[in-house]
Amino acid sequence: MKTIETIQEEIVEEFSLFEDWMQRYEYMIDLGKSLPLINEQYKTDTYVIKGCQSKVWVHAELKEDQLNFTADSEAIITKGIIAILIRVFSNQHPKDILTANTDFIDRIGLKEHLSPTRANGLVSMIKQIKMYAVAFQTQLN
Amino acid sequence: MFDVKQVRKDFPILSRSVNGQPLVYLDNAATSQTPKQVVEVISDYYYRYNANIHRGVHKLSQEATDAYEKARTTIQTHFNAAHPHEIIFTSGTTESINVIAAGYASILSKEDELLISALEHHSNIVPWQMLCEKTGATLKVIPMTKLGTLDMEAFENLLNPNTKLVFVNHVSNALGTINPIKEIIDKSHQKGAKVLIDGAQASPHIKTDVQALNIDYYVTSAHKLCGPTGVGMLYGKETLLKELPPYQGGGEMIASVTFEKTTYADLPHKFEAGTPNISGGIAFGAALDYMNKIDFEAIASYERELLIYATDALKKIDGLKIYGEASEKTAVISFNVGTIHPYDIGSILDQMGIAVRTGHHCAQPIMDFYNIPGTVRASFSFYNTFEEIDVLDKGIRKAILMLQ
């Protein structure tokens, strides 16, 4: 099992290979297509993340002591962004998710290539993932 | 003779780059860019004669008051209002609408009806919903057609002697449709209803004569027509504004104050409580001067060419659907491509230095009508070029290739 930190380092390295924004976006679009999709029954307002301009749904499930995330969005680039976050945070212990540093987002240059509204959406997504971790951590205690 | 190359020199911002590409600014319906001539008027005010207006005895205050009142006259002349005091300075279209809505709270009763169009911006829906909650009046909606025009037959059927106010935008912000306001005004007046025209999207493109059209209230914002943000206007016929109670209490709007009773000032000061956006008001006048110097006829005919050119180019893109196909529209193209989400196209265009708007454009009911989450909206101004439309065309094609 890779740690959150290791996965983050992998992503940072992958993104450093791209020479321009187009490659970066094409990669995110590809990631968006491979997103572990949320079960249709959870695509309701309860699971919508507020602060995103395109609709984003995220669902979390505890399997043994690890959190498993699925998601979906109307916009493919947004799906790519969630896919990156899910790759980092899925199959991790809630406690590790809670304490995880998220500065890898700045290091992969994601924020500067996102419009402000999208960047806010990114913050909301991370917040929501951490909220899930808080909720399930309490359950585990 | 209109010369876009010459005009662009007035807008330093147009020569900057974005994400390493020359900026192509096509979000003019959200806000227009500001020419040097207007920016200089603002700095000149702060460098030379910044002072509070109307109350001072000193020279600077007189100069500032004169400039502010001259701007009011410029606005009056531009819209052909009968009197300068029929022009009320506000913080913008939204506040102007709220002044009227707040005033009508004491005029309306339970039996009364308000009529708004399905093409409205949120700022022209919410204040009336609040007003209806407060007064018990009923809000009715003029439906729209698939082409993005108003259903005029339905409008006539909705009008009745209980209709007190009709609110329509002159031009729809989401689709660019130019509404037949003359017909709407005449028919509303026949039933005794007053009409408020939201000119925010029309005023940068069409010179409106409030007297010729017999408009009761007209509102717009300076930043849509080459002026600064945070300032706008409310026009109202003198008799109507006199009947309307003041919006906010404070300095400037009073004639005399004792603890027993305050007498309100005359128009326009009754609606201008507190220290206004002085430099903004002066710059609003300068912006109108600037646009009138270029000439609204020239602007309109050039923008029409841009719209035709852009529509032809974009229609050739496979799967691209344009929303809002009224025969009368301003230079706005609202579109989607297949099932691609508007945000995805907008984000990729941004990487190429092209500024468009994506989303519901604060007109969610219109998006619901078409059953779409939003659109990509490219809105053109007289300083845009045919070359920029070519860049947009290529940009959209590239985005589609990446996204499909």
Image (cartoon, rainbow, N blue to C red):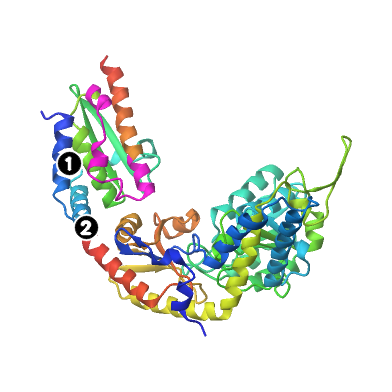
Calculate the distance from the C-alpha at mark 2 to the C-alpha at mark 1: 17 Å
The reply to whether residue B404 is visible in this rendering is no
Q: Residue furthest bottom?
A: B1
Name the foreground residue: B13 vs B194: B13
Q: Name the residue under label 2.
A: A22
Identity, as a three-letter code, of the amino acid under mark 1: Val
Q: How many labels does the image show?
A: 2
Q: Is residue A117 magenta?
A: yes
Residue drawn at (49%, 70%), measured in percent from left and top? B10
Identity, as a three-letter code, of the amino acid under mark 2: Met
Q: Name the residue under label 1.
A: A12
Image position of B202 with respect to B303: above or below: above
Mark 2 residue crowding within 10 angstroms, few (<14) / some (14–19) / many (20+): some
Taking the image as shown, residue B234 lies to the left or right of residue A131, namely: right
The reply to whether residue B184 is visible in this rendering is yes
Chain of the residue under label 1? A
Which of the two labelled residues, at mark 2 and mark 1, occupies the earlier sequence position? Answer: 1
Q: Where is residue B163 in the image (x, y as percent from the top left)?
A: 71, 59
Q: Position of residue B159 (x, y in %)?
A: 68, 63
Name the foreground residue: A141 vs B109: A141
Mark 1 residue crowding within 10 angstroms, few (<14) / some (14–19) / many (20+): some
Q: Does the magenta stretch include residue B201?
A: no
Q: Where is residue B140 in the image (x, y as percent from the top left)?
A: 62, 55
Residue drawn at (51%, 81%), measured in percent from left and top? B301
In this picture, which residue range is highlighted in magenta?
A: A95-122
Image position of B216 with respect to A108: above or below: below
Residue drawn at (28%, 34%), measured in percent from left and top? A59
The verdict on a common chain for dots 2 and 1 is yes
